Image: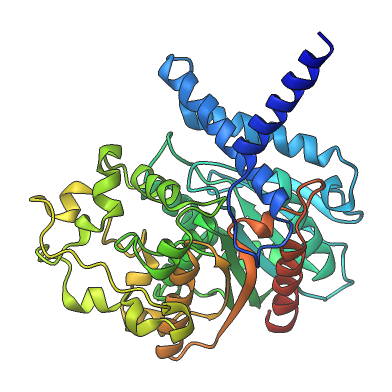
Amino acid sequence: MRLLPVVVTLLLTVGIAYYVYIPLPDAIQEPWKLMMLDAGFRTASHLASLKAWLGFDHYIHTIRQVTEFSDRMMASGGSEAGAGVVPGVKVSDVEFEGIPVRVYEPPAGGEGHLRRGLMFFHGGGWALSSAKKGAYDHINRMLSDELNTVVVSVDYRMYPEVHFPMPFFDCLAAAKHFLSPEVLAKYAIDPERVAVSGDSAGGNLAAAVSQEISIDDTASVKFSVQALIYPVLQALDFNTPSYLQNKDIPILKRSLMVRFWLQYLNADLSLHSHVTANNHSSLDHSNITPELRARLDWSVLLPPKHKKSYSPVIVEKGSQEEPAKEIPGLLNVRASPLLAAPEVLAKCPRAYILTCEYDVLRDDGMMYARRLQDAGVTVTNDHYEDGFHGCFSFLAWPMDFDVGKRAVRGYFNWLQSNL
């Protein structure tokens, strides 16, 4: 009888280890932390799918509840990164053109002293996270304090409540309001030192809004810089080297990114395998012109180091439907900023693009950096050889990563020197 508890404990330990363990590249530091994170996300996804199948709630709503609970737990850990309080920074929840935003104001710098301004769009696949919670809130508090910057973090509407283009329009409306001379004067912001920034899906929105503002002749003030953190920039090729190399690397696996895109563009989720195989961008689709394809031709745009031994996945003949009918918005540059014409990119502000080696979106960011440079824009591509998608946001104990701390510090340093 004494042996039974030992056997049960051993079996449970082996079962948990089997569930948690996934093979990771040797270059990723603190691998067990990432494995635990992945196990947590998988568990939340299974729970959400079960509740949705039983008809209790939309699976996105369940995942939001789980991630919000996780944020609260990590914030209660008491670490500096988790505490979220930065003395002296004034935080206000207001609305810009009806869009909820959180404004972070540093201590007053004295009479006549203008400050930097930065608008931030959070990530989460256009479906998850919030401008007011977790790491986003803490990073923006720190940025406001350290860089004497008025930060405006936008809570745009998300899936499943809305689809593209509504999140883009929310962000654009908030940006135009922020850039108005009256609002800049209200917050004592130097109109020559205003940035737009975002991570992942937020990096997508930041790039798209930056392009839109750059070509708007009616805008008297434009963004001075754009800072994009592992941005998602195109949905035509899910077989770039980074998508293939990192298709099973947490926390953003290729299958999840494809799903995020289909949700965002209000497409049928049954197209998942079709899109993953690049059938939606096959050569027989006449509206995807050679010129358009060249704008995301990684065989030309990527450095040799990152092409590795991969070959382009080009489908000769796909479905009968044109992409615009299958997936509305697929070719819209407001959804896929990498597809913008050279003359649009040439008007964009200088850029900071953070990429991570172990991220399906690595090549999106690197191709955009190259295209901006080819258009005459000054670009800094800050690449982390041991980085993975999401590392920028994991700063709170016990899921704090050294690479995430370095990434945030590199982002701050660039803004300090360039904004």
Q: Relative to 113, does residue 180 appear above or below in the rendering?
A: above
Q: Residue at x 45, y 85 (%)?
A: 303
Q: Is residue 222 left or right of residue 297?
A: right
Which residue sits furthest top?
Answer: 1
Asked which quadrant contains residue 339, the reply is bottom left
Coloring scheme used: rainbow
Task: Work out whether residue 290 or residue 215 is closer to the camera in this orientation and state it.
Answer: 290
Q: Is residue 241 left or right of residue 206?
A: left
Task: Work out whether residue 302 or residue 89 is closer to the camera in this orientation and state it.
Answer: 302
Q: Residue at x 42, y 15 (%)?
A: 55
Image location (x, y in percent) of residue 209: 46, 64
Image location (x, y in percent) of residue 79: 89, 48
Q: Relative to 2, does residue 336 appear above or below in the rendering?
A: below
Decide if residue 325 is in sight here. Answer: yes
Asked which quadrant contains residue 75, the reply is top right
Q: Relative to 22, does residue 3 appear above or below in the rendering?
A: above
Quadrant where the N terminus sits is: top right
Image location (x, y in percent) of residue 146: 84, 68
Decide if residue 229 is in sight here. Answer: no
Q: Relative to 268, does residue 140 appear above or below in the rendering?
A: below
Image location (x, y in percent) of residue 22: 58, 48
Quadrant where the C terminus sits is: bottom right
Q: Is residue 316 left or right of residue 206?
A: left
Q: Residue at x 17, y 77 (%)?
A: 290
Q: How many marks?
A: 0
Q: Residue at x 48, y 60 (%)?
A: 246
Task: Work out whether residue 297 or residue 173 is closer to the camera in this orientation and state it.
Answer: 297
